[in-house]
Image: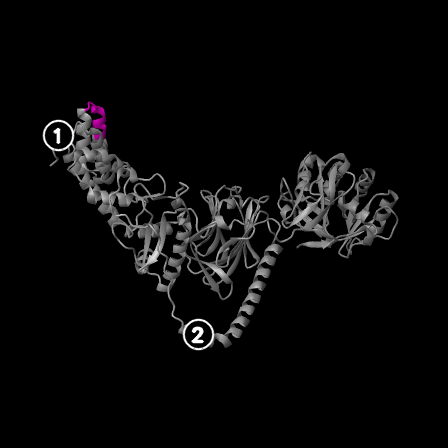
């Protein structure tokens, strides 16, 4: 916290004189260079004067002091000595140290150095120019710094002009005061609605600039009382005092994620809606219990997390990456907020705007780092922290805007997964200052060391019992718990009757995976990509008379190349997550029996994949009447799309290709079974289903063109033919050789 001694009236006895100096512009003169007529002009205009005491002009100062004392005008002496009240009469003479004065040279650019002003009480402005800046420029300088130009130094030739300038500045109405924390000045205070303005303890603004705008101080980590002041006539006569009070560390904390065998948000208390995908929980020697992200794992923070990360936010987290790729996401929220590691550098990303890489914040591999990101709305910037220290502050191209999306931990919309360990993620809806970030790091670091010490002591104490425990444990015969048999849950092998297709719980595989629960909601929407793969893989091995899939086969398909132990840990976590999501599906049970993973279904439970398989295996194609009555049931499923159209895994391809080939073969056979005319509607639907599985299937094209032409829909038939030709050209880069008339006649293309 940057605070400085406050000059109190009680201790100084004459602070009111210093206040008068702070609120007044003075002409800084050189006794050696000032002409007598200029001195007369200054005295006549009643201009306050200051003089810089040096060895050369020491003899001249008493004479000047006497002149101003007789005129009862303020006379300030600036010296390198410590400031002290002058022992004289009540004319307001004061000696001020150069250590209390900020110096600003505006000779070349009146606004070039305003942002470098310090906490010092007074402002000396040097303007050694041929002609002085106009009054408007001086007022702008005043409002930018929050300090009135207390001492103005100009070239001797411009003293006459400066006299009028100082008179005009002193005639301005002003609102002024002090911001203090206890008995100390508070530095680096911003002002709401006034961008790029900072003051240090004392402040003074011209009322002509502020107009009717309210003054409201702001500094990260503090609240103010009062928190706003209007520049009304009543507030222009006396100093306004803002009392700053430090905020508690937990103030504004909206999220605190912990990972001790389960994921908890200690602030929101929405643990039940947090959705983990493939998260592992481990005990780290340094951090204790923490979360492990395997590389395709992430956490959905739930609906309540939508309100997180509003402007003026702060984030801290402990991370330990074990792999660093091109991009590894730590936190994300929609497309407008991503905190990630980009090629080893902590990075803040706004999609479509910019990646803000912090080259000064490299993230090491295989070791714990305490990271922080703070957004400052008033300055439109983000600050990066590493192990409690500010590393870099970067200005944003556009203001950050919050989004109404759930928060993701460990991934983002582009699936830039984090690989490694995370612990203790905190988010505030306010800006933390440097001291607060440092305190968060120190507190956590001390807690880690204390926890490690306790753990070590416990380990040493436990070693004395370890041998006995191991002996007893080895004598026990460990039996794996077998799941209890579920009554009335069997795999269907018979072709279902027409009325067996349920509108309740069911699994749809054609046109995209849908797992409809008892509440008629699609549970699969909550599946992560890996959980979807796990579910489909077990499902495919649970139908058609199959008895399940082994753990090794699961690992080989879903986690190839991973060590057996790591694969086991990740597989176990994913299976538990899948079971948790299937709770709302009363007709499904995921079991492990005979060393195989299997999905068991209750009687009457509908799986469209199994329905189609049974149909293709058992349908009687000779009874045309019965076939025509039941076909709409099958076609309604197949018209939705191909089997698992959004999955590209190599292990699912054989199932998809086999199913598509069987559907095409069956459909072409139906062309020979069902005569045209009476069954045209069915035949067109069959042709459409064939085209879904093979867009360039010529028998399906011939059937469509033939039926549409006979029905008198010649233009529609031509459209179907033309679209086929366009697709053919796009795929093969050559013109389709088929002839429309030949197709109408039912002739095959050579």
- Whether residue 107 sits left or right of residue 264 in the image: it is right
Q: Nearer the viewer, residue 729 or 712?
A: 712
Find residue 372 and name its label.
Answer: none
Residue at mark 1: 742
Which residue appears at 28% of the width and 55% of the height? 547
Q: Nearer the viewer, residue 452 or 115?
A: 452
Q: Residue 183 location, x and y as percent? A: 75, 53
Please tell me which of labels 1 and 2 falls first in the chain: 2
Magenta region, residue range: 711-720
- Whether residue 56 sits left or right of residue 626 in the image: it is right
Visible residue check, residue 131: no
User: Per the image, is 439 magenta?
Assistant: no
Q: Residue 392 location, x and y as percent? A: 54, 53
**Residue 214, image quadrant:** top right
Q: Residue 40 location, x and y as percent? A: 82, 40
- Magenta stretch: helix, strand or loop mostly: helix
- Whether residue 234 sits left or right of residue 562 in the image: it is right
Residue at mark 2: 472
Give the number of marks. 2
Visible residue check, residue 128: yes
């Amino acid at each position: 916290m940057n605070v400085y001694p406050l000059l109190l009236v009680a201790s100084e006895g004459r602070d009111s004189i210093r206040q008068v100096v702070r609120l007044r512009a003075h002409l800084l003169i050189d006794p050696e260079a000032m002409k007598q007529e200029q001195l007369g002009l200054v005295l006549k205009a009643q201009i306050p004067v200051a003089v810089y005491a040096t060895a050369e002009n020491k003899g001249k100062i008493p004479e000047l002091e006497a002149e101003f004392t007789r005129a009862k005008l303020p006379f300030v002496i600036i010296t390198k000595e410590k400031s002290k009240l002058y022992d004289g009469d009540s004319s307001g003479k004061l000696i001020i140290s150069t250590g209390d004065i900020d110096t600003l040279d505006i000779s070349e650019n009146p606004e070039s150095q305003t942002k470098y002003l310090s906490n010092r009480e007074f402002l000396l402005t040097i303007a050694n120019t041929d002609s002085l800046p106009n009054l408007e420029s001086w007022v702008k300088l005043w409002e930018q710094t929050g300090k009135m130009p207390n001492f103005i130094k100009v070239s001797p030739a411009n003293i006459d002009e400066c006299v009028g300038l100082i008179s005009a500045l002193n005639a301005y109405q002003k609102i002024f005061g002090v911001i203090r924390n206890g008995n100390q000045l508070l530095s680096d205070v911003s002002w709401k609605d006034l961008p790029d303005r900072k003051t240090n303890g004392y402040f003074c603004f011209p009322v002509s600039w502020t107009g009717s705008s309210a003054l409201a101080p702001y500094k990260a980590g503090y609240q103010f009382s009062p928190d706003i002041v209007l520049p009304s006539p009543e507030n222009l006569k006396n100093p306004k005092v803002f009392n700053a009070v430090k905020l508690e560390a937990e103030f504004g904390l909206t999220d605190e994620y912990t990972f001790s065998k389960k994921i908890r948000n200690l602030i929101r208390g929405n643990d039940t809606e947090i959705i983990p995908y493939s998260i592992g929980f481990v005990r780290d020697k340094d951090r204790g219990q923490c979360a492990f992200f395997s590389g395709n794992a992430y956490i959905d923070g739930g609906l309540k997390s939508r309100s997180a990360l509003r402007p003026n936010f702060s984030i801290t987290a402990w991370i330990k990456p074990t792999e660093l790729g091109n991009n590894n996401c730590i936190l994300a929220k929609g497309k407008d907020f991503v905190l990630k590691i980009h090629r080893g550098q902590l990075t803040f990303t706004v999609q479509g705007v910019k990646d803000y890489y912090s080259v000064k914040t490299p993230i090491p591999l295989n070791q714990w780092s305490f990271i922080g990101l703070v957004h400052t709305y008033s300055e439109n910037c983000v600050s990066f922290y590493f192990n409690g220290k500010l590393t870099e502050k970067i200005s944003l191209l556009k203001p950050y805007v919050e989004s109404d999306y759930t928060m993701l931990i460990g991934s983002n919309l582009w699936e830039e997964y984090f690989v490694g360990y995370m612990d203790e993620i905190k988010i505030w809806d306010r800006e933390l200052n440097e001291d607060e970030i440092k305190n968060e790091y120190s507190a956590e670091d001390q807690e880690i060391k204390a926890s490690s010490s306790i753990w070590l002591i416990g380990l040493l104490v436990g070693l004395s019992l370890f041998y006995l425990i191991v002996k007893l444990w080895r004598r026990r015969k460990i039996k794996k718990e077998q799941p209890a048999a579920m009554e009335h849950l069997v795999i269907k092998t018979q072709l279902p009757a027409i009325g067996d297709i349920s509108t309740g719980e069911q699994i749809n595989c054609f046109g995209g995976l849908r797992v409809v629960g008892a509440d008629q909601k699609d549970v699969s929407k909550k599946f992560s990509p890996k959980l979807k793969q796990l579910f489909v893989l077990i499902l495919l091995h649970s139908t058609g008379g199959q008895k399940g899939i082994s753990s090794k086969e699961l690992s080989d398909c879903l986690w190839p190349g991973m060590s057996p132990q790591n694969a086991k840990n990740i597989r176990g976590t994913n299976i538990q997550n899948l079971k948790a999501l299937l709770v709302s599906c009363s007709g499904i049970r995921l079991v492990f029996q005979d060393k195989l993973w299997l999905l068991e279904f209750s009687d009457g439970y509908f799986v469209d994949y199994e329905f189609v398989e049974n149909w293709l295996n058992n349908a009687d194609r000779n009874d045309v009447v019965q076939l025509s009555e039941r076909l709409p049931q099958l076609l309604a499923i197949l018209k939705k799309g191909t089997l698992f159209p959004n999955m590209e895994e190599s292990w699912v391809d054989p199932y998809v290709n086999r199913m598509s080939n069987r559907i095409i073969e069956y459909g072409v056979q139906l062309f020979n079974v069902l005569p045209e005319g009476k069954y045209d509607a069915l035949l067109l639907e069959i042709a459409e289903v064939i085209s879904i599985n093979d867009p360039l299937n010529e028998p399906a094209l011939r059937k469509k063109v033939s039926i549409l032409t006979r029905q008198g829909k010649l233009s529609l038939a031509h459209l179907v033919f033309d679209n086929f030709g366009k697709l053919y050209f796009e795929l093969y880069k050559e013109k389709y050789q088929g002839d429309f008339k030949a197709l109408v006649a039912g002739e095959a293309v050579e």
